[in-house]
Image: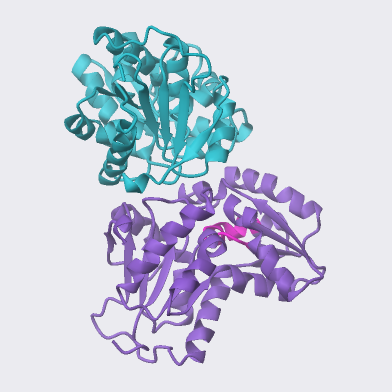
Chain colours: A cyan, B purple
Amino acid sequence: MEQKSAPVGVFDSGVGGLTVAREIMRQIPNEKIIYFGDTARVPYGSKSQETVTRFSKQIVRFLQTFQVKTIVVACNTASAYALDELEKESEIPIIGVVKPGARVAAEVTRNGRIGVIATEATIGSQIYSQYIKELNRDVTIYGKACPLFVPLVEEGLWQDPVTDEIARRYLTELIDIDIDTLILGCTHYPLIRSTLGRIMGGDVTLVNPAYETARELKELLEEKGLLNEEPPKLGENQYQFYVSDGAEKFKRFANSIIKYGILSAKTINIEEY
Amino acid sequence: MEQKSAPVGVFDSGVGGLTVAREIMRQIPNEKIIYFGDTARVPYGSKSQETVTRFSKQIVRFLQTFQVKTIVVACNTASAYALDELEKESEIPIIGVVKPGARVAAEVTRNGRIGVIATEATIGSQIYSQYIKELNRDVTIYGKACPLFVPLVEEGLWQDPVTDEIARRYLTELIDIDIDTLILGCTHYPLIRSTLGRIMGGDVTLVNPAYETARELKELLEEKGLLNEEPPKLGENQYQFYVSDGAEKFKRFANSIIKYGILSAKTINIEEY
């Protein structure tokens, strides 16, 4: 397969990474995507580095069977815990969602106070803090784990008084500290962006790593001469979705996020890779 | 090892099954327990029958390496989906949490209207309905999936206005239908029993399958002459805990549920079994 027309591999612990896939579809619409969601072992955010790394390696091996030209780790936890290990073992470029979000946050803050909301694992890894500090030593980063956001999003309570109440509890300390920039450090969170924006107030810039990652992917493909210049052929299945469990349920949820119409999702046994 | 002094194997997708282990410790205090929590792949309640069955078989193989004399499937989802398959492959008795709860509910209802709250998977399987109907054809069973209860319990919101609000939403239709018996069909739910009881009101009997399962285990061991008559020896590690991820975090949570003092929990790679 010619390199330019090869697909991009995208993976996440489940459905959250679809917010990244959606941005890739919008920003570089010629690209083919092979998406894998690890729905049999979701969530990753409460699991250990060792386990998340082992799971991520299996997924990279699975995606490589499609001769993907690059892989996007569309999961903050996997990006935080496993990216270095994955890069060591891979000959194709692998990009995570953490660096692109960190870079933009370091650029846009005016008062040097940046908040990060994410899973326990991502916050515990201090990875956002580390990347941002490399770019700008004069900022302070405040991390806050928000473990209930993922189940609330998955339950469909995107606009709901309960989500408001939980968000208020999680965010109060970040408001009190007077941050001016908030990184949505979990790929589920863009789906409750309006709730988060309302609670934080108009003076706080929300950084969506999904958007920034798609932009970085586009730049990377341009640099390496790998951008697909040809639109998909008629009848070609441009977007393919694989999961480790519950393909039908995944398809329903995915169709509520991605408006392109997901034709099919297949279940595979990821433990075999 | 003599059969009577062999340990009992207990497993769950994570920490929920500890409510069952706790009842076994209370009701038959001489027994040794090998507990396995599948914390790397928790939760099971949103996964498919095929996946839950595969996971459960791996765990049974792991527990059998300890020469357990019987296995308790301390997870409603695994009991609903996998028990039949596990029984086929095993030479030792295996009991689940569904039948004991179903039996008591069929006995205690006066108006013949029984509610079951559980994960999506357990409700979708209609297993409680099936067992109860076998015992009493004249009852009606109303199932309600409550997917947010597990994350709320794991976040520690056992007594909280948010848990109240979510519980009210889930339970309203069961109150309107005038059930007089409610089965707590997920091993996490006994931890929010007081909230559930308050919302349902004093006329509704709450059935806790954890309690009934320990009672059934005791009866089974008595019948087969397998009850351990000797108290644990001085210095013996009576309760051993294994998980597939995050042993330290598991230990902290377990110590908030079980007051016997959990000395250690070990992480193993369950995918190798």
Which residue in the rendered view is the most extreme toward the left? A88
Q: Main secondary structure of the magenta part?
A: helix
* Image coords of residue A59 (percent x, y): 33, 37
B166 magenta-colored: no
With respect to residue A150, does B96 lie above or below?
below
- Report the front residue among A266 and B52: A266
Residue shown at 50% from the left, 54% from the top: B50
* Image coords of residue B49 (percent x, y): 53, 55
- Report the front residue among B193 and A8: A8
**Is residue A136 in view?**
no
Which quarter of the image is occupied by the C terminus of chain A? top left
- Report the front residue among A68 and B151: A68
* Image coords of residue A271 (percent x, y): 34, 48
- Report the front residue among A232 and A185: A232
* Image coords of residue A171 (percent x, y): 46, 28
On the rendered structure, is B31 left or right of B119? left
Q: Which residues are magenta?
A: B184-196
Residue shown at 55% from the left, 60% from the top: B81
